[in-house]
Amino acid sequence: MSDETQLEARLEEQDRFDPPESFVEQANVSDEAIYEEFENNWPEAWERAAELLNWETDWDQVLNDDDEPFYEWFVDGELNATENCVDRHLDERGDEAAIEWVGELGETRTYTYEELHREINEFAAALREQGVEEDDVVTLYMPMVPELPIAMLACARIGAPHSVVFAGFSADALAERMNAAESETLVTCDGYYRRGDALDHLSKAREGLADVDGDVTTIVVDRLGDDAPTDVDDEHVYGDLVADHEGATVEPVTRDAEDMLFLMYTSGTTGKPKGVKHTTGGYLSYAAWTSHAVLDIKPEDTYWCSADIGWITGHSYIVYGPLALGTTTVMYEGTPDYPEKDRLWEIVEEYEVTQLYTAPTAIRAFMKWGPEYPEAHDLSSLRLLGTVGEPINPRAWKWYYKHIGDEECPVVDTWWQTETGGMMITTLPALGTMKPGSAGPPLPGVSADVVDASGDPVEAGRAGYLVVNKPWPGMLRTLYNNDERFIEEYWQEYSIPERDQWVYCPEDGAKIDDDGYITVLGRVDDVLNVSGHRLGTMEIESAIVGVEGVAEAAVVGGDHEMKGEAVYAYVITEDGQAETESFREEIIAAVEDAIGPIARPEAVVFTPELPKTRSGKIMRRLLEDIANGDEIGNTSTLRNPEVVDDIQQKIE
């Protein structure tokens, strides 16, 4: 047996991994007493998060819980987010890189803290000239260009909350969000590049603006230059406005800790997006503390979160958390396989990236492409790896740990949501034993349980509902202009009178082990009820992806006369794997072995692709429609709508 084969076998059997001593010795948080400190001194222990920031006025009270669940953090404290992310670093970090930007076509831009400060001030002055005042919501509809974080921080500087709309969203989605936020200012761009092609973004923005109530001031960033398919017309040009205010300085507006920093719209059960409100003091403290404690960020690092700023991950862990700590944060415009499948590893090597925080979806793609791509590059600068966005199955975790981290980097598998503002469940990288497939215990100061429908804790190993029992600084304060929906969606159903407290329900299924480690099983509506048994789609998918030759899988429920619901598995195979009946049986056997005969898939459908939104999320609703033979719903939000017909033909 070769050394490589022996190594693979050892990794396959191992279910616990300890952080390397070299990491522990230098970690920001390495004292196990931190858990006890938070337990014994809650909520005052959260002052350690607030103390990572500069406050113009200190807080009088850490937590005000007089009006549950409308909690307030760091009461009467005052600060400005941009001052904390930029100004205060100028003396020691002014000449150091704040943002390293890499464009899809290979262009690069470096913004030092001094340069970032200058352009933020100039654009803040331009926004004021356009009539933007404190508490006005400014909508930002841009891809991964440096002007996006600059605009966010310019808004924060003048006390104007921003509402970032993901560039991949439709014109209708833009209009809906602008109307809901009553936003009268839009910052967008002419377009951007995807796989080498120039995409027209301005026309889409104009289409959305046609359905926005009232007059809107529009500012357009020139990204494409001569490649722009659409010329700026009545809009203002970002570059011209900045040039007109060259050298301008704008004093940071003092904001109360509970003043809104930004709105972020997220999907709702009613189909209407929810405007999640995050505040200045609690959110920024929490983003900074989790970046410090979980991602181990230090000022001298070059840190890379590969998310899009159009999502909460980009807000917390590309912009606010890293910049609050004075580090260098990397932004990448393009896709991980353009122009070649080693693009990410080129960037890691070139910039000597120290932490990489990415999604399991990307890791599964890396696995499918093969280890030869990362192995062609020097990744030894990496000190920590992280995953975000969805649960990661053990096989993908181990691949990431071995082929990207060389078994020398802790892996933090983080669970959190738009609504939580930052990480909630994960190991602290220098303290916790890592268990592939399990996110880990709640962070210090975070109280989470897995309960049944009555709110009682379930036994170890049993599936239940994930709930959070105590407030935390990064939490959403309400839904914009809709306090009633805020209570109904997150709190009311899971209030437990006998405990005399409210609990937050994130709508995720989970299970907990004897060590208090929580494994998130996916959304509650991603839990199947097969013959009265609750089966997490994540558990089934993990069993399938654990089969050699499987690259990715999606599991949904289909109507079944006897079982109520049956398991339908859609499977992408790795290159070179034959899609045979015997391989299908191997997958079915793996599911039965891992979970039991009750989870046996009704059908295993091989497909070259899964229907995904432009942000990379699998559209399971369409897969359910296919399984049930129902009429297929809207596919306009997919980046690959053609795959739906292919899958339909295979299942008929």
Image: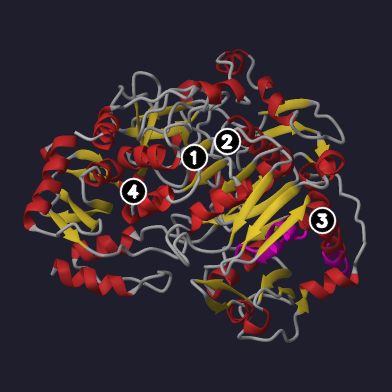
Q: CA distance from mark 2 to mark 4?
A: 30 Å
Labels 4, 1: front one: 1
Residue 146 on the magenta span: yes
Mark 4 — residue?
A: 525
Mark nearer the N terminus (1 vs 3)? 3
Q: CA distance from mark 4 to mark 1?
A: 26 Å
Residue extending farthest to the left is 582
| x, y percent for residue 555 | 25, 52
Mark 1 — residue?
A: 386
Labels 3, 2: front one: 3
Mark 3 — residue?
A: 115
Mark nearer the N terminus (3 vs 2)? 3
From the viewer's side, name the closer residue of 542 and 7: 7
Q: Are marks 2 and 4 in contact (CB under 8 Å)?
A: no
Q: CA distance from mark 3 to mark 2?
A: 26 Å
Q: Are marks 1 and 3 in contact (CB under 8 Å)?
A: no
Mark nearer the N terminus (4 vs 1)? 1
Three-letter amino acid code at disc 2? Leu
| x, y percent for residue 393 | 33, 41
